[in-house]
Amino acid sequence: MEHSPPPLFRQGAPAFLKMALFALVAVALLVADSRMHTLGPIRQAINMMLYPIQQVALLPRSAVNLVSEYFSSLAELQKEISTLQQQQLENAQTLQQTQNLVTENANLRKLLEIRGQTQTKSIVGEILYDARDPFTRKVILNRGSQDGVVAGQPVIDVNGVIGQITRAFPMTSEVTLLTDKDQAIPVQVVRNGLRSVAYGRGQSGLLDLRFMPANADVQTGDVLVTSGIDGVYPPGLSVAKISQVENVASGSFGRILCQPTGGIDRNRQLLVLLVDMNIQPRPAPEETVEKSGRRRPRAAVASAPDTTEQNK
């Protein structure tokens, strides 16, 4: 009975001989591949067979890379959107400031043109803020008594009369608008020369021609300018335009509303006319000193001789 050893302990060719044989085969393949490129097609065929296996093995890594790239790109996109929105807000603010500067520049140019046309000395001022009194129509300018501003001087803009200086401080001054309920200005209709006085109507922002007869020659659209008879406002300055004329019964006064041509809601730069406010006092009133009904000045009464003593 023959006993054969198990395969693990079966004896064969020596291991050294096997290693030498495989080494020779490897060297021969390397020489053949480097000299004659005989293994190129075999290598390509093996690569094509192993490519699907490689792709399947790389699927977990590709999935992880795709997920990480998605979240990183999403975070970068949100950051870019936030940056662009911030830039848009800054650009919008810059554009608005630029438009305001362009408007102020155009307004200043017009004011300088008006300043060159008027013979009265003037100074440009800027509105700082509105007065805190809700029952009046007043603003505060950045020009004061140190700049030659005194109470009573008129204030205009590029479109017309704004108001009048009512209080002057060293660095600032208070301007009461024409539409204030305590303000009045002598005006004249450009079309026919009719003179009147325009009064402010308070918070409504309009002017009112009071005490006008019902048959007065005024029409809607007539332009009113300063008449200059008050000695404060120079003549010919645009004041308002008649917007409404109410016809009432004959013999009574009509209601005439006017829309001011100038306004602080459109311009911040104003022109203060530095007119001389040293107005001459009114002459003394005349008195009746004779029984005949003639009127003679008070000075003449003082210098007239006493005829009663001479008659005695």
Image (tube, grey):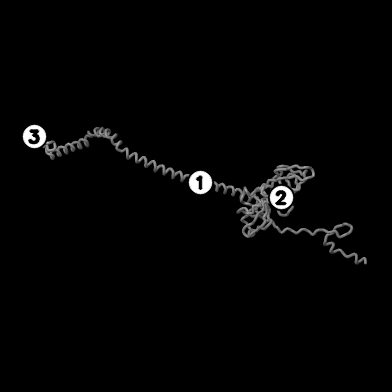
- Does 70 sit above or below residue 133? above
* Foreground tag (3 vs 2): 3
Q: Mark 3 points at which residue?
A: 3
Q: Distance between the residues labelled 2 and 1?
A: 45 Å
Q: Position of residue 192 (x, y in %)?
A: 75, 45
Task: Name the residue type under label 1.
Answer: Leu
Q: Which residue is drawn at 32% across and 39% down?
A: 60
Circle 3 sits in a helix, a strand or a loop, which is it?
loop
> Which residue is label 1 attached to?
89
The residue closer to the viewer here, 274 or 199, is 199
Between disc 3 and disc 1, the foreground one is: 3
Give the image quarter of residue 307.
Answer: bottom right
Numbered mark located on residue 199 in the image: 2
Between the residue at mark 3 and the residue at mark 1, the CA separation in whole angstroms equals 96 Å
Depth order, front residue of 51/159: 51
As helix, strand or loop, the secondary structure at mark 1 comes to: helix
Q: Where residue 98 sits in the image (x, y, percent)?
A: 55, 47
Where in the figure is residue 151, as x and y percent of width and height? 68, 57
Tag 2 and tag 1, C-beta contact below 8 Å:
no
| Total count of labels | 3
* Position above or below: 182 against 2: below
Spatial CA distance of label 3 from label 2 is: 140 Å
Cβ atoms under marks 3 and 2 closer than 8 Å: no
Q: Residue furthest left?
A: 1
Q: Percent from the top left, x then y, of residue 46?
A: 25, 34
Circle nearer the N terminus (3, 1) = 3
Compare marks 2 and 1 and give the one earlier in the sequence: 1
SS for tag 2?
strand
Say few, some or many: other residues with alpha carbon within 10 Å of mark 2 (under 14 / 14 to 19 / 20 or more).
many
Amino acid type shown at disc 3: His
Q: Which circle's residue, 3 or 2, is located before the other in the chain?
A: 3
For label 1, count other residues whose C-alpha is less than 10 Å away and answer few (under 14), some (14-19) or many (20+).
Answer: few
